Amino acid sequence: MATLSFNPTRIPHKPISKITSFSKPTKVYFPVSQKPPKTHQKQLHFQSKLSVSTQEQVEVEDYDNEEEEEEVDDDPTAEVSYLDPETDPDSIVEWELDFCSRPILDIRGKKVWELVVCDDSLSLQFTKYFPNNVINSITLKDALVSVSEDLGVPLPEKIRFFRSQMQTIITKACKELNIKPVPSKRCLSLLLWLEERYETVYTRHPGFQKGSKPLLALDNPFPMELPENLFGEKWAFVQLPFSAVQEEVSSLETRFMFGASLDLDLLGIEIGEKTLIPGLAVASSRAKPLAAWMNGLEVCSIEADTSRACLILSVGLSTRYIYATYKKNPVTTAEAEAWEAAKKTCGGLHFLAIQEDLDSEDCVGFWLLLDLPPPPV
């Protein structure tokens, strides 16, 4: 098992402490001059045409020629209905969903709404446009049923969504279908797809309104006090080589351990095995109960807020907690800034590890996290 540790080679003549209480500053220096890792935008399997769910049906489609097929592919008004023919429909038990207006006007001069549904592997993709006067839980419930029927997949056990303003409608529609709604910003595949659709679909739509701001912008509220059950006893900024991060992620599947991973291949992120990934290690004598509580929160990201001299934990839709504080001075500010710079160097990738002791070689909880900008819609 990989050991969570600092990189002592940066400051060879100064000791670096691993153990830090929640009320004391950390002692860690990151190699902020390190060259950025190699990143690569993998060609994601997005569909931009009306597709079908089985290979047999695909073979029935008959285009006159290749030019006509390309024309259909490029149609920005087309809706998507796609299921990877190599995917077992029963294996897709969780969906990601967005139901919101788009920067597109219909013939009435009103903003068009769109339902976008996918799974985390993008094996399932579905979109449908709606006029703004039919936006309610009944419309959404019927649309979810149509996704299931059109693609021949069972309704999911869970649906994740990231807009707090739509929570009432989404929750009501899900509960009427016995689906568990999960408010969460860990909808990374969906967020990337929306970004891709903005560039390749919405901006090319004949009704596109350039400069139109999102109707339902994401919340970024003032951070709240941390609930008592989420308190740790000690914390430290740490780094792990990417290869060691992969070991910890593998442990999520091979042994009993709380946490969550990310599909970096799908996200198009390539990082060298020796690249140092920044993270936060939290130690507690009640590490397992703490990790269990954290596991139900849909942990999104951790941010070092140098203006408030604290660490902010983002969970769920829009909940932000003051996770830890430190005494503000030039040294601690520089350390926090270096940690944030290390995150940017890694494309926003970072992690949270919960341990019984900061010197332990084992984690009881490990969350791989990624900072992503809000979607353009």
Image (cartoon, grey):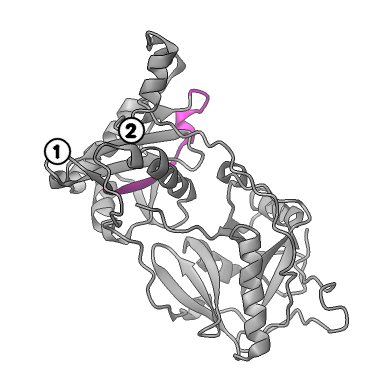
Q: Earlier in the sequence, mark 2 or mark 1?
A: 2
Q: Which residue is mark 2?
A: 76
The total number of labels drawn is 2
Nearer-the-camera pick, 122 or 69: 69
Q: Which residue is mark 1?
A: 107
Considering only vertical position in the picture, is 79 above or below 60? below
Q: Is residue 128 visible?
A: yes
The residue at 26%/57% (across/down) is 215
Other residues around mark 1 within 10 Å, as few (<14) / some (14–19) / many (≥20): few
Residue 116 in picture, x, y percent from top left: 34, 41
Q: Quadrant of the N terminus?
A: bottom right
The residue type indicated by label 2 comes to Pro
Position of 139 with respect to 53 (left or right) is left
Q: Which residues are magenta?
A: 85-101
Q: Which residue is at the far front?
A: 210
CA gap between label 2 and label 1 equals 16 Å
The residue at 64%/53% (across/down) is 252
Nearer-the-camera pick, 327 or 353: 327
Mark 2 lies on a secondary structure that is loop
Residue 218 in picture, x, y percent from top left: 36, 62
The residue type indicated by label 1 comes to Ile
Other residues around mark 2 within 10 Å, as few (<14) / some (14–19) / many (≥20): some
Examine the image and state in which quarter residue 336 appears. Answer: bottom right
Residue 68 in picture, x, y percent from top left: 38, 15
Residue 333 in picture, x, y percent from top left: 62, 84
Mark 1 lies on a secondary structure that is loop
Q: Is residue 351 visible?
A: no
Position of 82 with respect to 339 (left or right) is left
The residue at 65%/85% (across/down) is 332
